[in-house]
Image (spheres, grey):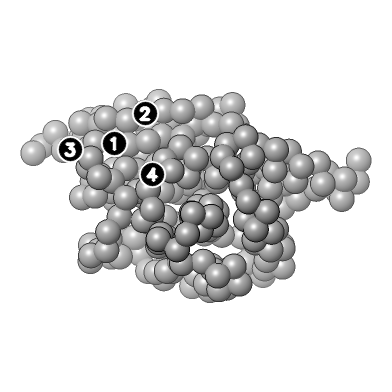
Amino acid sequence: MTSGVKDMDARAEGLRLLEELLPVSRESVHKLGIYESLVKKWQPAQNLVAPKTLNEIWLRHIADSAQIYANYPQARCWIDLGSGAGFPGLVTAVLLAQDGEDYSVDLIESNGRKASFLRTVARELGLKVSVHNDRIEKVLSNWAKPVDAISARALTSFANLCDFVHPFVSEDCAGVFHKGRDFDRELEEASVRWNIDLVQKQSRTDPDARIVILHRLSSKDA
């Protein structure tokens, strides 16, 4: 099977899964297609995604990222931590834009070149996205905007994510994270320090992964 055929098959499978997760407009599919093209254009210089997944962007990255918004669609103001190539933050922004302009997505990325890529995609797609080219701790320590949810994908351990988001997680703000096969161990480690209330949902793209929705978090030292 040629790489072109594999690419088409992955796109078709990714689109099928995306449309099973939530309604997706033609305009959104068009925007996501432009996004895919920009990833491939910038990939040689920026190494935005793992090379072996470059021809499976719709399935391995777009549909996978869409699970974040699909599992917490009530949120309109998002922060995405360690955004990298924009998965899931830019995908979340595309899906939010389907329901009007009343949304915001803030992407935090310390790598300057990747931050430039994120700004380029947001501009090309006309998204209400702000890019913060700085360390996560520094950006969050000065946060003053409304936030309904905080996302992260393939970033760091669950204990570290708890450290980042604990000032925000409440009845009005959830953490929504992609986690892999080691999450049970990560949860056990985080539970040493934190009282944790969360829901786990099976990933639709990876049988070993899950989407974790963190609803409440408090320190055991408090």
Q: Quadrant of residue 77?
A: bottom left
Circle number at residue 74: 4
One can see residue 93 in this view:
no
Residue projecting furthest to the right: 1
Q: Residues within 10 Å of mark 1 (few under 14, many from 20)?
A: some
Give amino acid for label 3.
Ser
CA separation, marks 1 and 3? 11 Å
- Which residue bears the numbered disc 3? 218
Work out whether residue 169 or residue 166 is closer to the camera in this orientation and state it: 169
Q: Are marks 1 and 2 in contact (CB under 8 Å)?
A: yes
In terms of sequence position, does the residue under pointer 2 or pointer 4 come before the other?
A: 4
| Total tally of numbered discs in the picture | 4
Circle number at residue 199: 2
SS type, badge 2: strand
Q: Percent position (x, y) of residue 63?
A: 61, 43
SS type, badge 4: loop
Q: Is residue 21 above or below residue 119?
A: above
Give amino acid for label 2.
Val
In terms of sequence position, does the residue under pointer 1 or pointer 2 come before the other?
A: 2
In terms of sequence position, does the residue under pointer 4 or pointer 3 come before the other?
A: 4
Question: Quick check: 129 left or right of 18?
Answer: left
Give amino acid for label 1.
His
Label 3 or label 2, whichever lies nearer to me, is 2
CA separation, marks 1 and 2? 8 Å
Give amino acid for label 4.
Gln
CA separation, marks 3 and 2? 16 Å
Residue projecting furthest to the front: 100
CA separation, marks 4 and 3? 23 Å
Circle number at residue 164: none
In terms of sequence position, does the residue under pointer 3 or pointer 2 come before the other?
A: 2
Looking at the figure, which quarter contains the C terminus?
A: top left
